[in-house]
Image (cartoon, rainbow, N blue to C red):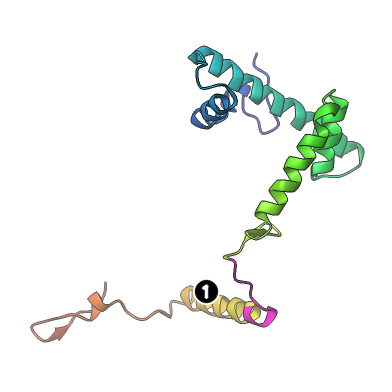
Amino acid sequence: MEPMDIVGKTKEDASLPKATMTKIIKEMLPPDVRVARDTQDLLIECCVEFINLVSSESNEVCGKEDRRTIAPEHVLKALEVLGFGDYIEEVYAAYEQHKLETVDTVRGGKCTNGAEMTEEEALAEQQRMFAEARARMNGVATAPKPPEAESSLNGQLLEPF
């Protein structure tokens, strides 16, 4: 019988992108060192198992605090509980660096194009989108007809289907 993870898939279903992992492995080694394919596969499986272990422990830490969302602090605590306390400082530094690199592109879980909307602009855009959705729902076209629909054949106007 195979162990099942939280979402109901077998552990064999969970993996990491081989090309990315191979690139990471090669970047960490001197250029003259080669890694056998089965060794690469073993390293990938170790990484998957490590992620499963840290995720599971993070979930337990989170549950002990009666929380439903795993936060970075839960992951750091899980690393400590699992005996990886020596890495917490480095992991936290990487997390802080990640936050700095993504602060301009991700806000509150939503991507921005670098251009912020004022509250009034956002409200106007929302109202416009609601109006378009209502019109589509009621069968009223809001967008202009494409140029192809207005072309004529022998002087007759062709309507779209």
Q: Residues within 10 Å of mark 1 (few under 14, many from 20)?
A: some
Please provide percent x and percent y for residue 28. 60, 26
Residue name at image x 65 percent, y 24 percent:
47
Left or right, 17 with reference to 92 = left
Q: Secondary structure at mark 1?
A: helix
Please provide percent x and percent y for residue 46. 65, 20
Left or right, 80 with reference to 29 = right
| Residue lying furthest left | 154
Please provide percent x and percent y for residue 61. 87, 35
Reading the image, the residue beneath label 1 is: 133
**124 inside magenta stretch:** no
Left or right, 114 with reference to 65 = left
Give the amino acid type for the residue marked by disc 1 in the picture.
Ala
Q: Quadrant of the N terminus?
A: top right
Residue name at image x 53 percent, y 77 percent:
134
Residue name at image x 79 percent, y 45 percent:
69
Magenta segment, prevailing SS (helix, strand or loop): loop
Please provide percent x and percent y for residue 35. 52, 15
Q: Nearer the viewer, residue 33 or 67?
A: 33
Residue name at image x 84 percent, y 42 percent:
73
Q: What residue range appears in magenta?
A: 114-121
Image quadrant where residue 116 sits: bottom right
Q: Is residue 82 above or below residue 93?
A: above
Q: Nearer the viewer, residue 155 or 64?
A: 64
Q: Quadrant of the C terminus?
A: bottom left
**118 inside magenta stretch:** yes
